[in-house]
Amino acid sequence: MNPRIATLDGNEAAALVAHRTNEVIAVYPITPSSTMGELADQWSAEGKTNLWGSIPAVIEMQSEGGAAGAVHGALQGGALATTFTASQGLLLMIPNLYKIAGELTPLALHVAARTIATHALSIFGDHSDVMAVRQTGVALLASASVQEAHDLALVAQAATLRSRIPMLHFFDGFRTSHEMQKVALLDDDDLRALLDDGLIAEHRRRALDPDHPVLRGTAQNPDTFFQAREAGNPFYDACPGIVQQLMDRLGARTGRRYGLFDYAGHPEADRVIVAMGSAVETIDETARRLNLDEDRVGVLKVRLYRPFDAAALIAALPPTVRRIAVLDRTKEPGAPGEPLFLDVVAAIADGWSRRSPRATLPVVVGGRYGLSSKEFTPAMARAVFAELARPEPRRRFTVGIMDDVTGLSLAWDRNFSIEPDDEVRAVFWGLGSDGTVGATKNTIKIIGEETPLYAQGYFVYDSKKAGAVTVSHLRFGPRPIRAPYLITSATFLACHQFDFLDKYDVLETAAPGATLLMNAPFAANEVWDRLPREVQETIVAKRMRVFAIDAARVAKEAGLGGRINTVMQTCFFAVSGVLPRDQAIGKIKEAIARTYGKRGTAVVERNFAAVDRTLAALAEIAVPGTVTATHRRPPIVAEHAPDFVRRVTAVIMAGKGDLLPVSAFPVDGTWPTATSRWEKRNLAEEIPMWDAGLCIQCNWCALVCPHAAIRTKVYDSAALAGAPEGFQHVSWRGPDLKGQAYTVQVAPEDCTGCSLCATVCPATDKADRTRKAIAMTPQRPIRERERTAWQFFLGLPEIDRTALTRVNAKTSQLFQPLFEFSGACAGCGETPYLKLLSQLFGGRAVIANATGCSSIFGGNLPTTPWTVDRSGSGPAWANSLFEDNAEFGLGLRLAADRHTEIARRRLQELRDDIGPELVDEILTAPQLRESEIYEQRARLAELEKRLDELDGPAVTDLLSVLDHLLRRSVWIVGG
Ligand code: SF4
Ligand code: SF4
């Protein structure tokens, strides 16, 4: 019987097996593994049963440590139990993994492998987490693709029951966990064929049971621990054979054959790359291509990494191999080599002569690649093979970056491609909120499940929350698609947001003759002239076909509001040629009926209407033979931005961070603050406009704004000299500073358009209650004018903080926010509080931030929102681990208190040299009121001046802690 085919991602592929083969599932969410737990939870909630007819109990714990503890307990209770995790989550499980392995307890745990935070946090994929548990005694089984994540999830579950060695089954975070592929599903009979009920009964018999009481977890002494630790050796010796038997049994049923180490390539290869995870697919495909020419190369795919079967590795290598490169997707600083490399070296040194007594040992070199989901492409694989062909290949190297510091990196030819001609490769640029990803996933399902074509989808998300750019990479073709890397020669590109063409090099990946589809808010005959010169140049040079549609208008007219996904999906099918047009339209309508059927026929009909209107509104744009545009893409950041922002931040903002060399980066993860002000995201369709005549000067608009994008200032009206035409101001009516000028001003390119300011504004026109002092107004027509007004506003003097006798909700908004333009969701309810705190105390704050939303909108590159005042003071910010912000903050507090004490003592010691009056004033300053803080700042400036004229160790010591004489504010911010 043919297997059922489904299009799904690696997380779902693994979870489909885990849910059917377990009784207890304890979870704690962590990217990129969360989907496995969420799906298991959903399936249990829907009443889906496991193989034995019961619904697995899914419980969410308080942490990954808790999930591991619950799993350990469930296993000791005789249940089949599992969990899913990644990165630090896996590290939190380590103590329990030692226990579970030491007690020889069957467990198949599934990991979407992810980077561990070091100089920075990263949610993306590499093997640093799984490599950090290889000492615990769990077996490590690697899947390289979505199909393997499905198949080897079963092998892991079956092998752990038979071997009693807990199995950690992993696959590459994001690259496999989130890649959609067409997969042949294992049915329940396949699962039963590998899972032995007798072994499950044995596992239950070993459970803690008062009718047959035993004791586990004893404390052992020097006389016994060591021997007992060796007693489990036979189980590890037997494990690889058991895994292979089960792989063979799976292969006999499904035709999909796996080995502990699988070799692919030239049968007489002289050069071989050893690797594990998704990269082996890329290397395999590259080797095939190279072997069509003169090369003799291959790849050894590592599947069972622990227990490491050295004999099986040697047996799998072709005897002709002379040069081996071992690629590790992890970094162990200071080690003689990375883990897989060292294991291969040891295996070859130990065992090669037993295989061929007179043969020379192959040369084995080691390289790092792909940290934090850095791309690994066929061009990079070819560069590694080329390095092996050199007379003296580098012993250690990196590939995929440009290392101009230690010179370790290999060069690669970015134009090398092995993509077949008969594939459709489509790249879609959209916004997180515009439905692009949903529509492209839908497209993959339509093509993958309803046609004989193979389909692959991968989605690159920008980690900003508001206005996140999403780039979907879709491949369709007549053969299985083994290309776990981004598309570099697209046959079709769609730009769902016209403004992207001004910001990003959307056409960079276009193949010659590619088709471009744009959502353009203009009439078809205007579109060409609206394109920046760079875009026109590429279109002409690559002889592209161009189509455009005003998708927002079509969607609106069809009653879909601003949702353009159905419109753009229809356009894709209409122009890409991936399916005959009529067939494709029929399939879209079927998908609409399935997706929206639950919401009623009216919704379905509206979407059907959108499809029909789309076909009428889609227009091909005539491409002239030459470039006609006079305007170019605006610079990414202003020319007067700081050097680092122009050299580094702007490159990342343009989506070209991969091109930055090693030397561009701080060595210890220290980055400048005050960078979000340089990123003009222009997210808002509508922005607030202030009506000075109606305003009652409550400052609520500024108080609630989550992005510090609307601000108020009170200033001397003399500063209005040179104000741009139409710059609004009125006379301030507050008791302090009465009569000075007052302005409410929006930052037009930083506002997210959330409209909270307009919602809270209490001032209305008595003659027309619908008119408020803040009105949301289309941004594009007033962008230039308001940009000029904003620049002028920024140049106005900041308020003299000592002149305010009362600081309250209203007057606090006259202080400069030191938290601005964060990437938080539009309308975020958390950021207004952070912003307010920054206005009150930000100039003397250090922040201990937990991991979560606030660490992402607070510290995610390229630009960050914590900023500085005119004197350069502002919050200093750090994120330690996920949950240790309280302890981390306590440490900061203890350090501050200790240094304050030192500073005060030194001050006393130097009293006569400095001047008793100043010293006494500093030591007795109350520093409670805003004015007192500012008086203390002035004293410290004077102190520093006087210390510059003195010398000696006490002076040096005091200068190093002088800042602590200003009362320091330590914040502990939740995730
Ligand atoms: Fe701030 Fe939202 Fe108003 Fe824009 S619309 S100024 S982001 S509150
Ligand atoms: Fe003026 Fe309205 Fe802002 Fe209050 S909320 S300051 S009334 S614009």
Image (cartoon, rainbow, N blue to C red):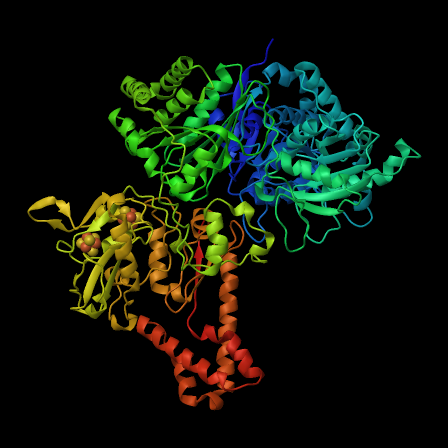
In the shown orientation, is residue 404 left or right of residue 575? Answer: right
Residue at the farthest bottom position: 912
Residue lying farthest right?
358
Residue 757 position, x and y percent, is 25, 49
Specify the quadrant of the image occupied by residue 102: top right
Place of residue 736 in the rendered image (x, y in percent of width and height, measured from the top left): 20, 70
Ligand 2 visible in quadrant: bottom left
Residue 813 in sight here: no
Q: Determine whether 767 is above or below 51 in the image.
A: below
At x 80%, y 36%, the residue is 233
Q: Residue furthest left?
A: 767
Q: Nearer the viewer, residue 14 or 336?
A: 336
Q: Is residue 274 above or below residue 703?
A: above
Q: Nearer the viewer, residue 628 or 43?
A: 628
The answer to whether 4 appears left or right of 236 in the picture is left
Where does the image place residue 84, in percent across and percent down from the top left?
57, 35
- The residue nearer to you, when weighing 51 against 877, is 877
Query: Is 406 or 933 nearer to us in this picture?
Result: 406
